Image (cartoon, grey):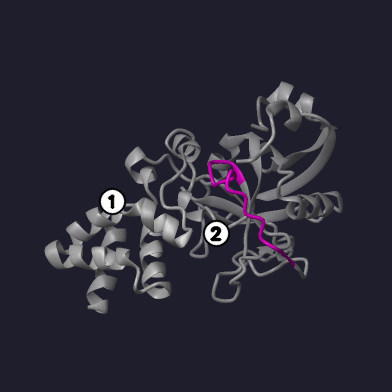
């Protein structure tokens, strides 16, 4: 029976093609750091989040040291993201495989539920779970999300998270009555009945496992308008946001790439940091701290 339930969970995935506290006034008091990312294809402006202090401090330190200057966006994937920050990319030969370099340290994950992978999100790259179960971030490599616009059906419920919750519950609490409800639904009607029952039990499964299954309204709105890449949420630390120059991300993703997703023509970055009042940032770029 376990084999059939596992198959049903797989079918569930295949069936659907996949807050911070404080008032607005409090958030715009004091100074902040405006990030300028100059590239061969245009310029982006970004802010870094106070709620991810380790990532913010590290990024500012590296930028002020000139660490990022002349590094490549070495991994570019249309409809997904652009990635850079590998120091080995500065003088890399054409076609050389990149993505393993860094400053020699990692940063502990800083997940904040109100920050997610909408278009323009500045997020930390990291090693995969097999060698990095704590999801610690790379000390220097980061990516900027392009993603795509999703439909409400795709964002209404995270089917990957739903499947994960079912698997987690079966493994950690096999006697939970929810397991029997799901098993009975599969026995009665197969994959489709199982999928419907799983979606009906989403709230209870989320409560039993602590896994967020239904996407918050704020995320749904962003992913169905601006776009982004929901499967990255709660997997990589989002520590900033591009607030001007989203079109530059689109331009970079049009370049031709090799089988390792490295652009055939180098796309370099130059990053600078300017400390200015938050009120000036809001005045020029809008309500970026909401």
On screen, residue 280 versus residue 285, left or right, reads right
Secondary structure beneath label 1: helix
Where does the C terminus fall, quadrant-wise? top right
- In the depicted structure, whether residue 284 falls above or below residue 207: above
Secondary structure beneath label 2: loop
Task: Residue 149: give x, y in percent of width and height.
Answer: 42, 39
Chain part drawn in magenta: 106-121
The residue under the point 25% across, 63% down is 181
Task: Residue 211: give x, y in percent of width and height.
Answer: 46, 58
Callout 2 environment at 10 Å: few (<14), some (14 to 19), or many (20+)?
some
Secondary structure mostly seen in the magenta stretch: loop
Q: CA distance from mark 2 to mark 1?
A: 25 Å
Task: Residue 120: give x, y in percent of width and height.
Answer: 58, 41
The numbered mark, 2 or 1, whose residue comes first in the sequence reads: 1
Q: Quadrant of residue 73?
A: bottom right
- In the depicted structure, whether residue 45 falls above or below residue 89: above
Count of numbered badges drawn on the protein: 2
On screen, residue 25 versus residue 159, left or right, reads right
Q: Which mark, by number, is residue 235?
A: 2
Please give the residue where the numbered disc 1 appears in the rendered image: 200
On screen, residue 61 versus residue 39, left or right, reads right
Which of 264 and 121 lies nearest the eye of the viewer?
A: 121
């Amino acid at each position: 029976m376990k084999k059939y339930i596992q198959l049903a969970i797989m079918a569930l995935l295949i069936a659907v093609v996949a807050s911070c506290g404080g008032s607005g006034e409090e958030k715009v008091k004091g100074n902040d750091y405006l990030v300028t990312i100059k590239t061969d294809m245009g310029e982006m402006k970004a802010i870094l989040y106070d709620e991810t202090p380790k990532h913010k401090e590290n990024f500012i330190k590296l930028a002020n040291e000139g660490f990022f200057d002349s590094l490549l966006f070495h991994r570019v994937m249309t409809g997904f993201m652009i990635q850079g920050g590998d120091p080995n990319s500065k003088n890399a030969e054409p076609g050389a495989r990149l993505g393993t370099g860094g400053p020699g340290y990692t940063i502990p994950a800083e997940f904040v539920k109100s920050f997610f992978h909408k278009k323009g999100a500045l997020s930390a790259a990291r090693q995969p779970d097999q060698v990095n179960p704590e999801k610690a971030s790379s000390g220097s490599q980061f990516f900027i999300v392009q993603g795509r616009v999703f439909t409400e059906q795709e964002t209404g419920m995270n089917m990957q998270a739903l499947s994960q919750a079912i698997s987690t519950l079966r493994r950690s609490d096999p006697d939970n009555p929810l397991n029997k409800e799901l098993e009975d639904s599969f026995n009665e009607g197969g994959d489709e009945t199982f999928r419907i029952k799983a979606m009906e039990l989403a709230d209870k499964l989320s409560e039993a496992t602590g896994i967020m299954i239904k996407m918050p309204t704020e995320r749904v709105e962003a992913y169905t308008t601006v776009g982004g890449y929901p499967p990255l949420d709660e997997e990589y630390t989002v520590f900033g946001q591009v607030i001007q120059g989203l079109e530059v991300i689109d331009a970079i993703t049009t370049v031709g790439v090799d089988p390792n997703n490295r652009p055939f023509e180098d796309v370099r970055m130059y990053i600078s940091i300017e400390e200015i009042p938050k009120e000036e940032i809001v005045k020029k770029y809008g309500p970026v701290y909401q």
